[in-house]
Image (cartoon, coloured by chain):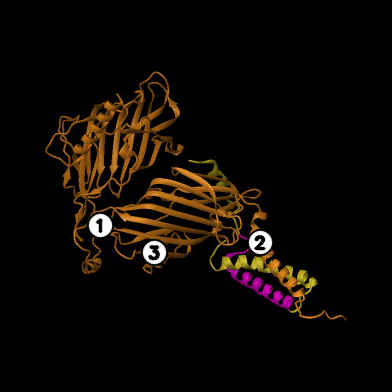
Chain colours: A yellow, B orange
Amino acid sequence: MSSPLLDVWEAASASPYTPAVGKGVQFTLGFVLLFTSLVLATIFGLNRSFVNLSVLGVPASLAFGFGAVYMICAVGVYV
Amino acid sequence: MRSVSFVSSCLAALSSFAVAELNLSQPLLSRQVLSSSFRPPPVFKNAHLVRMTNLDKAYARETINVIIENIDNKPQTKYYLPFDASLISKVGGFEVKDKKAPEKGPFKVEIVEYDTESSTEFYLIHLPTPLAARGQQTLSITYSILSSLSPVPASIGQTDKQYVQYTFSAYTPSAYETEKQKTKIKFPNSDVPDYTTLPADLNAENKADPQKQGSTFTYGPYHNIPAGAQQSVSVRYEFTKPLTHASLLERDIEVSHWGGNLASEERYWLVNKGASLKNHFSRVEWQKSSYMSPPTSALKILNLPLHPGALNPYFTDDIGNVSTSRFRPGKKEALLELRPRYPIFGGWKYSFRVGWDADLSSYLRKLKGDSYVLKVPFLEGPRIGEGLEYARVNLRVILPEGAANVKYSTTVPIIASTTTLHKTFLDTVGRTSLSLSAINVVDDLRDRELIVTYDYPWTAGLRKPIVITLGVFSLFAVVFVIGTLDTSIGKKKTA
């Protein structure tokens, strides 16, 4: 008994999906990114200039964005 | 004309009730089921038919092996199987295979109704290759009839044995003439106190029906039974087990590419359709007998065999966490043992939710480009010896946000499917969700798979972190702008 989609599944047996970051390191990575974001935001808070907005604000925002996604996964809400 | 046919169908329905009762002294009459307008063309003949009715579980399982013969002079593809309108709504898991080549898979079947006033409806079986004139083919038809057992007596004591009654036709309902047929009934044990006896002159071998062999009864053989003939009989046998019925099962499967996780959650609405308690529930009596663990009509425990690798199970109901559960992870299966808060006696209900996580890598594979294929069980659920029937199963596969071009395939008969958006944590547009509904599902379909393919570009995956990034960056920008505002009172200082 076979269906077209079952054949598709069988054909893809060599390529199981692996996430970029495994479950074991999600918390560590999320924490490091969120902490980095906090540190950068603090430095920006001490010296709020237009240059710092791009030099510190952009990496802090990126770190918070990815850190938040990994942290929410690490605590069990898999998004 | 229409009213005459309506009255005659009403009379037929009433007579079926009268005959269906356990009335062992009165002779039984054959009944012809006639549809008011439609009759399947008499192009087939059942050369030999053997029906096995298995009553081991809390629902009746029927297997009909029949040699059909095309008696027309043209090749035929449409074979009809009639059911009473009240019965067809309880039939589940209807499958037809070629007995001699079961590996070719099930045939296409559909329910047909020709007249809303008719008491007979049909399953139409499409033979994959037309059966030539005078040609023969062996069909193996299997189905289950849900909610078909009724407890008699309807109320019993807490530690009493439970007896259930099953009513069926000794002649297998058919739209065609049947040359030879018999019906075998397999009981869970040999305690069968009441059953309908049929006179010996109906039987082809002039024996009084049924013939008993341990826990198996045989009605027949009968020769040359005309199309539509029925002979209602009832059996009553011991079944001191719960008649567990799930009026609804909602099952969610959530795919997370970021977390590499497959989250499953199932919400059950269970009811025990067994005999109700004659007196009040006695906790003392229950506790006393629980050490001996005698057979009981109450549902005590539900074992959920999960796939190996299942993690983080939870079991909650309306009150909150139910602590009477055990989780035994293993290499072959991860067994989740659930004990409801109270034993579920006949007529009692219990609703709860259970969920668990699993690694996505064993369920999801990557195809060329940005496509993925997901293979998950359509139904997991408890594995109990006496079986479990589901009146309705609503399955929802929640794919990542931005997944498109969703296709699915399953061997479980589906009555409805939709693709909608489901909004939850960190979503902006909502996740693509595939909803499938099935009715009259039995736990025999546990190992059936659902395969879903979808496209998910990597740019769609970046939506969540980018949205948060932009939000936080705008916060920085707002802080910067506010910091540059001069809110001091008085004249501006000039250098």
Report the magenta stretch's main SS: helix
Circle number at residue B297: 1
* Outermost residue to the right: B495
First to last magenta residue range: A19-45
Q: Residue A61: x, y in percent?
A: 69, 68
Mark 3–mark 2 distance (CA, rounded to whole Å): 36 Å
- Judged from the image, the secondary structure of the residue bearing numbered disc 2 is helix
> Which chain does the residue under circle 3 lie in?
B
Indicate left or right for B81 with B191 as reference: right
Mark 3 surroundings: few (<14), some (14-19) or many (≥20) residues within 10 A = few
Indicate left or right for A76 with B248 as reference: right
Q: In the rendered structure, which amino acid carries the disc numbered 1?
A: Ser
Q: In the rendered structure, which amino acid carries the disc numbered 3?
A: Asp
Sequence-first tag of 3 and 2: 3
Read off the residue under disc 3.
B318
- Judged from the image, the secondary structure of the residue bearing numbered disc 3 is loop
Circle number at residue B359: none
Sequence-first tag of 1 and 2: 1
The answer to whether any part of residue B309 appears in the image is no
> Which chain does the residue under circle 1 lie in?
B
Read off the residue under disc 2.
B467
Sequence-first tag of 1 and 3: 1
**Residue in the picture at 30% in, 50% down:** B58
**Residue in the picture at 58% in, 52% down:** B365
| Snapshot quadrant of residue B180 | top left
> Which chain does the residue under circle 2 lie in?
B
In the rendered view, tell whether residue B146 sits above or below residue B101: below
Which residue is nearer to you in this view: B231 or B248?
B248
Q: In the rendered structure, which amino acid carries the disc numbered 2?
A: Val
